[in-house]
Image (spheres, rainbow, N blue to C red):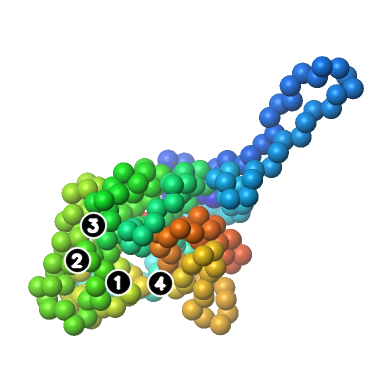
Amino acid sequence: MSLVALSACTSHAIAGPVTVARPSASPPSPSVSPSVSPTPSTPPKRGTLEWYVAQVPEFPPLPPTPQLREAIKPGEPPFWLRVPTDQKVAFITIDDGGLARPEDVPAFIRSAGIPVTMFLNSPAATAHTDYFKEIEAAGGVVENHTISHRSLPGLSYSSQKHEICGSADKLEQLFGKRPTLFRPPFGDHNDTTMTVAHECGAKAVFYWSETVDKGIVRYQTPEKILHPGDVLLMHFRPALMDDLLAALKAIHKAGLTPALLEDYVG
């Protein structure tokens, strides 16, 4: 079974399992004479969308019901670097949005059924709304990453509220849904950040377990393997296709399946 994008029981789900479209040989044309052999199909060229899709490993199905080890307390958004679940899942997240937006990424996410959460800065989302809506249509979800990507600790309550609520307001206007998850720039936060994030509508605030850049997974532990609930961070950069593929291969190597972050937060 190929990569399953999402469970059909959630509001963010893609209906039914998504099967990776593997390139297959086309039926041979009628031979001019019996002595002419059919020409074998040409494998996809490295670096093309078809090549990336063909490299995606096959994953076990997602758990039918997402489960956490601990409940989220109303009014107290948790700060997580790893989702507290024992289920064999990991989460792909992409930040920022202003630097680069490789054109094949939406099609790759759609074709391979990759569940992604986008933590966007609102100016980037405003400038490139159609691009992010393509990813959203493929099953991705837009979440909040402030307006100006400033480190929040040290800013006043009103300044933090401007950064967090102002971005949430704009993203809601652009995409028709208010963000419910928040990632502070650089992961930097203090008590004021957590209070304001809740006031602006966040149910959970996220750090990350691993980073991915230029097609390389950078582990935060010496074991160099993913664990259930791990959150992988990458960015909208030129090598995003390679980063997505590297993340999928690392998730597969660990015996996990990619899942949508929002399904586990509720």
- Distance (Cα) linking label 1 and label 4: 12 Å
Compare residues 30 and 255 and report the one nearer the observer.
Answer: 30
Where the C terminus falls, by quadrant?
A: bottom left
**N-terminal-most mark, 4 or 3:** 3
Q: With 94 as the anchor, is 51 left or right in this view?
A: right
Give the residue drawn at x 40%, y 72%: 208
Q: Which mark is residue 185?
A: 1
Q: Which residue is mark 4?
A: 208
> Where residue 5 appears, x then y in whole percent?
47, 49
Relative to 177, residue 209 above or below = below
Q: Secondary structure at mark 3?
A: helix
- Distance (Cα) linking label 1 and label 2: 11 Å
Residue type at tag 3: Pro
Q: Which residue is mark 2?
A: 164
Q: Secondary structure at mark 1?
A: helix
Residue type at tag 1: Pro
**N-terminal-most mark, 3 or 2:** 3
- Distance (Cα) linking label 4 and label 3: 23 Å
Residue type at tag 4: Trp
Give the residue drawn at x 12%, y 78%: 156
Residue type at tag 2: Ile
Q: Which mark is residue 123?
A: 3
> Where residue 108 appears, x then y in whole percent?
49, 47
